[in-house]
Image: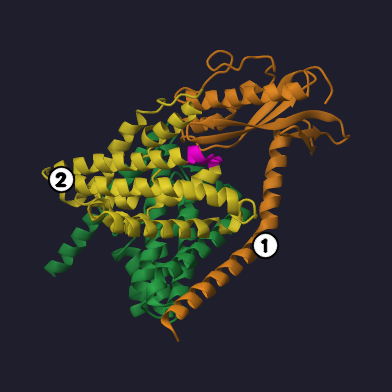
Chain colours: A orange, B green, C yellow
Amino acid sequence: MNQYARMIIVLMIISIASGAVLALSYEVTNPTIQEQARQKLEQSVLTVIPGATKMEEVQKEDMMIYIGLDDQGNKKGISFKAIGSGFDGPIEIMVGYNPKEGKLLGIEILSMSETPGLGARIKEEAFTKQFKEKSAEDEFTAKEDVQVISGATISSTAVANAIRTSLDKIVKIYPVGGDF
Amino acid sequence: MQLFKDFINGIWNENPIFKMVIGICSALAVTTAANNGIAMGLALTFVLTCSSILISLLRNVIPAKVRIPCYIIVVATFTTVVDLFMKAYFPSLYEVLGIFIPLIVVNCTVLARAESFASKVGLARATADALGMGLGFTWAITLISMIRELLGAGTLFGYRVMWDGFTPWVSAILPPGAFIVMGILVGLINMINRKTAKDTHSH
Amino acid sequence: MAKELFFIIVGSIFVNNFVLSRFLGQCPFLGVSSKTETAVGMGMATTFVLTMTAVAAYFLQNYILAPFGLEPFLQIVSFILVIASLVQLVEMVILKISPTLYNAFGIFLPLVTTNCIVMGVALLIPMNNYNLIKSIALGLGAGIGFTLALALMSGIREDLEFADVPEALRGPAIVFITAGLLSMIFMGFTGLVPLG
């Protein structure tokens, strides 16, 4: 057999086999990956909206809004994702909010790659709990109405800024005091 | 006997991290907690073993001129398989290890073993060598991560082991700590080696 | 936009140096850093490939992988193949157009394929959702940061040859410890990039 033909055939067979293996693994794992992602999302929505046991997704403009409902189907609040640019890549934050009272219900850091021991401490409750009950009309200025973690000013500021920016959009969709 | 020798080779004599000092990016980057070290090590062992087995089996089929692209495709395929399965079944670990799982594909250890060993020997020896190298990588990376977790957080595998009032030496889990712990360990292994070499020499 | 680009570049050179803080590209960092001349050659070759890879990864991700839904399972394979071919291509072109240039940094090119900094940058682009210009900035910044780390380390190692290093620490061990100190110095750049 021609040397070149053999080279091409071997490469092709290996590529096709590789493609088949990958497509198969993807088929096997994909449902689980989707399910994991959904569970994680629901978990965080229920964490940031106290009293909620179920969630509903709605899309408003370019934002995905997750509405938290209790067992009776009463709306307990809404939540949305805010993305800040941290010290080392994006910080994803789930924010719980009650438009009727214009107050935050709580926040949770979904993902970040900040420095362990410093910026990564934005995940700790000591930092996140200060956003509970915070008014949507606040400025969210670091070191003024938002306390920063010492040694992690950048990460703390990124969180505060990200929440403020997303809140600006949310307030336009759900005016303070209105229904949701 | 030959098989045992091939296996031990990776565990100690040619340990990829401490002796050959190759493929150490992940050994430095993800070793902030002992769990991550083990997970990274096992992921690499899987990719290394599967690739070595397949490359050894195909060693008479693959033409020499296109062997490198073939190896790359094989390694990349197994890396993706690990990537997908970890994402599905160990999502929290997957998040911590981040891009270092896909980066197994360019881990020098994997390609080096494929090129210099698996492509030249039979299935049994290739498997023994890959398992040895993989587990050699795993114990080394686990040791580094245990030291860093112990010093940097005062815990081991997430359990508190240091006395109360121990102030964690955060530097150990920051980047400089990785380099320094690694340097000291490589130095220690050198010392042990030198000592055993001297002992066998004097007998 | 200009500000963001500046932050990406300065960030990847100093604040989160790809070698000293993200731990990418360790193999050449240890292997090719004993002489400044070769270190700079390696750095240049890598920077060149990195910038081109950034462009290639951007187009591959946004025009082929994402639209066809192939991203989850073909990303790794396609990125590594593109990088390997790109390196090969660059090597051939340089050899043809300028043998001097080839001698300066072309000889390092085959080593660039398995440098994880290249694959790392390729993977970071879709992860951070960078646009084309930001991708180029990341590739360039990563390359310059890599060159800087390599040049610094080689300068230190040239002097280290005359130092009385304890026997057991000779070789890679002392290089790691030196890298640790360098990394500590680079941590001093924290906060250089403020967030707007």
Which chain does the numbered disc 1 sit on?
Answer: A
Q: Is residue A32 left or right of residue A16?
A: right
**Observer-nearest residue: C31 or B146?**
C31
Position of residue B128 relative to residue C22, above or below, is below
**Observer-nearest residue: A135 or B58?**
B58
Most frequent secondary structure within the magenta stretch? helix
Question: In the displayed image of the protein, which residue is found farthest to the bottom?
Answer: A1
Q: Is residue A8 magenta?
A: no
Name the mark nearer the viewer: 1 or 2. Answer: 1
Q: Residue at x 60, y 17 (%)?
A: A140
Tell me the quarter of the picture where residue B104 sits.
bottom left
- Residue highlighted by disc 2: C165
Which stretch did the figure color magenta? C128-135
Q: Is residue C131 magenta?
A: yes
Q: Amino acid at mark 1?
A: Glu
Q: Position of residue C106 (x, y in %)?
A: 28, 55
Q: Residue at x 32, y 53 (%)?
A: C27
Tell me the quarter of the picture where residue A60 sits.
top right
Q: Amino acid at mark 2?
A: Val
Q: Cα distance, mark 1 to mark 2? A: 55 Å
Is residue B28 visible to the viewer in this orientation of the structure? no
Q: Position of residue B55 (x, y in %)?
A: 44, 74
Q: Position of residue B77 (x, y in %)?
A: 52, 64
Position of residue A143 relative to residue C30, above or below, is above
Q: Is residue A36 left or right of residue A179?
A: left
Q: Residue at x 39, y 40 (%)?
A: C140
Is residue C167 visible to the viewer in this orientation of the structure? yes
Tell me the quarter of the picture where residue A99 sits.
top right
Which chain does the numbered disc 2 sit on?
Answer: C
